[in-house]
Amino acid sequence: MSARSVPEAVDLPPLPIAPRLDRLRRTFAEANCDALVITRLVNIRYLTGFTGSAAMLLVKEDDALFVTDGRYTEQAEEQLGAAGVDARIEIGANQTLQRDSLMGALGTGHRIGLEADGVTWSQAQSMTEWFAGNEVVSTTGLVEGLRRVKDDAEVARIRAACAIADDALAELLPTLADGPTEREFALALEFAMRRRGASANSFDPIVASGPNAAKPHARPSDRRVGEGELVVLDFGCIVDGYCSDMTRTVSVGDPGPEARSLVDVVATAQRAGRDEVRAGITAGEVDATCRSVIDDAGLGEYFVHGTGHGVGLEIHEAPRVGKGVGDTLEPGFIVTVEPGVYVAGRGGVRIEDTVVVTETGCTPLTLAPKDLIV
């Protein structure tokens, strides 16, 4: 087992949630609205600390209303109170009563923003009727934009989740020599992370051996891990809502010169991309750096996905790190760097770290060794 700290041994700092509503309000003018109805639960969690499965949040320039149902009366009061969030809480037993609460808080004559990525077409039509006497407008990425820059408390949670994943992998890697099935190893990873304090997987683990490694998002199967073949392990966990993400490619014994060559190319590309990450560079430039190494090796056609993505309350969030993406990285962004090469019938390689952007570079949060041979 590794010596990395896991959450039981870490005093996680409190999340500074209360100031986030005012930060959101400062985006209203550019979004051409004076109120925002938030329906995406992950955004409601970010702004209030609420972790339930049903809620809506109305944020006005000088007021906020949190609406949920009776299952969450105590939880809402406890979590919003603990976060210091200045919002009225109203409980509606059904959608009609919740709608009435929102309508009563709004009045008329407002420009009300809806989250374009958080409502269906049907919901948007219904809300337009709800808020008659107001103008309903579409907004994109207002809360998600705030979530891009992680504060120290958020970084601490993602670092703790990464530590759990590192530690679980260190424990379990030797068991690959016993020839478990992909499914058995994936399940063992999940149990190992939960024993260390994770609340859940951040996504379904990928354990892909031999020819299955040529499928970037292969699902664990009943295939047994064999000696001398590449095994792609992509997994992560959640600590206090925040995700980790890591990929390592390993082999039980020497996989041979052809496979080692693929691993060397991807490892070189991943190091180059990680070294490129810093404040002021675009996400597309990081992708281009990784891609150029793989292109120069004559393997460009086998790199079939983007180089990475943001990580936080969601496993995939802004910014995307891909070809031509113009988003400029800023200090506090947390992104992955995960180039890969996948050759049908032969196998595949992906190596991934999660890093936090700094002014002069980046700090890796995933620290598991990248040794090929188990």
Image (spheres, rainbow, N blue to C red):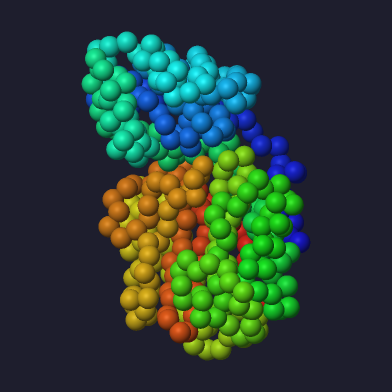
Which residue is painted at 63% across and 49% down in the image?
200
Residue 8 seen anywhere in this rendered image of the structure: yes
Which residue is painted at 53% across and 24% down in the image?
69
x then y, percent, for residue 289: 36, 65
Which residue is painted at 66% across and 68% down in the image?
185
**Residue 142 location, quadrant:** top left
Left or right: 300 in relation to 259: left
**Residue 112 location, quadrant:** top left
Instruction: Out of 242 and 353, give the one closest to the viewer.
Output: 242
The number of discs equals 0
Looking at the figure, which quarter contains the N terminus? bottom right
Looking at the figure, which quarter contains the C terminus? bottom right
**Residue 220 location, quadrant:** bottom right
Q: Where 226 falls versus 336 (above or below)?
A: below
x then y, percent, for residue 67: 48, 21
Q: Where 109 falls versus 83 (above or below)?
A: above
Residue 141 seen anywhere in this rendered image of the structure: no
* Residue at the outermost bottom position: 257
x then y, percent, for residue 363: 53, 51
Which residue is painted at 51% across and 24% down in the image?
68
Q: Where 180 falls versus 320 (above or below)?
A: below
Left or right: 32 in relation to 78: left
x then y, percent, for residue 355: 51, 53
Instruction: Out of 23 and 185, give the one closest to the viewer.
Output: 185
